Amino acid sequence: MFTNRARILVAGAFVIMLAVAVHLRVFEIAGVIVMFIGLLIWGYFKEGTIILAAKAFHHKDYDKAERLLREVSNPNWLSKKRRGFYEFIFGGICLQKQDFDEAGKHYEIAAQYPLRSANDHVAALVHVANISIRHGNYDKAKAYLALADKHDEKITAKMKEVIKRLHQELDKK
């Protein structure tokens, strides 16, 4: 739960402590410090800045959320749980910017990964279906709505209503 800059500062402090521990020949402490540095590096690649971006997104600070997400150098290296959330948040940011093509891409990727809840997973599917309807790709919309329908017993009433409206809109086409 660090920004990249904070990770560098903390890692720098650990490197200084490591140098002192090695100089004083306290190798047990040096070993623990090396583990902490390894944990920071692991967190950089597997965790990223997703939690901070999610907090900013929740507070509707979309510019900060996007900046934090862009700090992730390679989203493919994120853990499966974080990758889905990364794509989900990025999709929401793209929706706020009204960049529907990019939002659809991010939500499609998010739907392939585990998310916090079934409701979030269905929300990603519904967003892709809605964007597909807006672009006239009705077959794709039907396919994603069919996937969303499989989770009917696990989602909220509000989400069920959204799915129902999208089905009605598809039936008109």
Image (cartoon, helix red, strand yellow):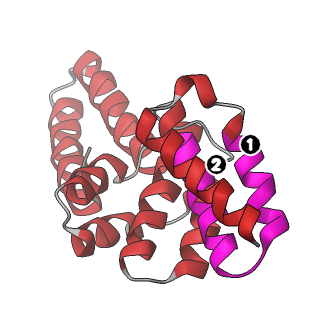
Assess whether residue 140 is covered by the magenta stretch. yes
Identified by mark 1, the residue type is Leu
Badge 1, how many Cα within 10 Å: few under 14, some, many 20+? some
The prevailing secondary structure element of the residues shown in magenta is helix
Write the residue at 30% across / 51% down: 54
Give the left or right position of residue 2, taking residue 111 as reference.
left
Q: Is residue 83 visible?
A: no
> Which one is in front, 60 or 146?
146
Q: What stretch is highlighted in magenta?
A: 120-148
What number is the disc on residue 111?
A: 2
Write the residue at 63% across / 51% down: 125
Q: How far across and how far down the image is residue 103, in percent?
A: 54, 71
Label 1 – label 2 distance at C-alpha: 10 Å
Element type at marker 1?
helix
Give the left or right position of residue 167, taking residue 126 as reference.
right
Which residue is label 1 attached to?
A: 147
> Which one is in front, 65 or 68?
65
Q: Do the residues labelled 1 and 2 touch (CB within 8 Å)?
A: yes
Q: Which comes before the other along the chain, label 1 or label 2? A: 2
Q: Is residue 138 visible?
A: yes
Give the left or right position of residue 57, taking residue 77 as reference.
left
Q: Is residue 144 above or below residue 35?
A: below
Write the residue at 14% across / 37% down: 20
Q: Is residue 113 above or below residue 22?
A: below
